Amino acid sequence: MSMSDNPDIPRLDPWSRLRVHTSARIGLGRVGDGLPTRQLLEFQMAHARARDSVHMPFDAALLADNIGDLGVPVMTVQSRAANRAEFLQRPDYGRKLAPDSETELEAAANTTVPNAAPDIVFILADGLSARAIHENGADMLRQTLSLLGKDWSVGPVVLAHQARVALGDEIASRLKAKISVVLIGERPGLSSADSLGAYLTFGPKPGCSNAQRNCISNIRPAGFPVRDAAHKLVYLMNAARQNSISGVSLKDNFSPSLAYSGQIIDGS
């Protein structure tokens, strides 16, 4: 009998060397016709975390406090979805502003907010994972602003409750911004409940399609690191402003080496 055939000798798991390179569930094994207990419990825990991220309340006050040192005005708005249940059942409500928020934004654009017709407006939204915006939103905004040139005028930061990506079009349109960036919690996966997305739109207005946006996805410590994502976002912002386009018309020629050297790349 060889050593490999001897049941009394413990065997090394051949998948262990591959698991260190990914959070994907690979080579889980089985016990009879089911998963081993440990893998089953880990799956149930991941599923519970994903559900918690979807239903977690958006703490706009905490987020406003976390970005208070940036020195930019902060506003809070609400979509037409009155609560989380309605937001999940009526995605179209998450794309429209509540009447009170429409009035507040129009007043802000016309009277009270500095840079009332800014180059860029940032919207931080709960989307499908409030946890993602809580954990990564402030850092992403801070690092992006730190990379922007002084020739950018920045509008108020808008914190949006029960929001889908397209809500940013209406917000930016009412604030008369040339470009919008929506930082929003993405649909949680079983290994990525904290994933943040960044959506850039040039000339935002109600009715814009997804083809008119550029998206940076999976922004989180275990995915696309915030600092790298901020460099890529600023590259896209510069290219969008330079060429007056975004989405599929804007070629993504992002190069980390050029971006970190401070060069601006033509994205036309």
Image (tube, rainbow, N blue to C red):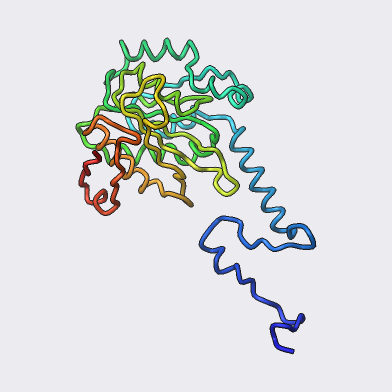
Which residue occupies the foreground of this view, 71 or 38?
38
User: From the viewer's perspective, is 78 left or right of 115?
Assistant: right
Image location (x, y in percent) of residue 3: 70, 86
Which residue occupies the foreground of this view, 207 or 127?
207
User: From the viewer's perspective, is 162 left or right of 146?
Assistant: right
Residue shown at 73% from the left, 58% from the top: 35
Q: Quadrant of residue 257?
A: bottom left
Residue 225 position (above or below residue 56)? below
Work out which residue is located at the far right of the displayed protein and give it.
32
Image location (x, y in percent) of residue 166: 45, 25
Residue shown at 78% from the left, 59% from the top: 33
**Which part of the image, by quadrant, shows the N terminus?**
bottom right
**Which part of the image, by quadrant, shows the C terminus?**
top left
Image location (x, y in percent) of residue 118: 27, 23
Residue shown at 60% from the left, 47% from the top: 190
Number of callouts = 0
Residue 155 position (above or below residue 257)? above
Q: Quadrant of residue 147?
A: top left
Work out which residue is located at the far bottom of the displayed protein and give it.
1
User: From the viewer's perspective, is 31 left or right of 250?
Assistant: right
Residue shown at 45% from the left, 41% from the top: 136
Image location (x, y in percent) of residue 117: 27, 19
User: From the viewer's perspective, is 243 left or right of 80?
Assistant: left
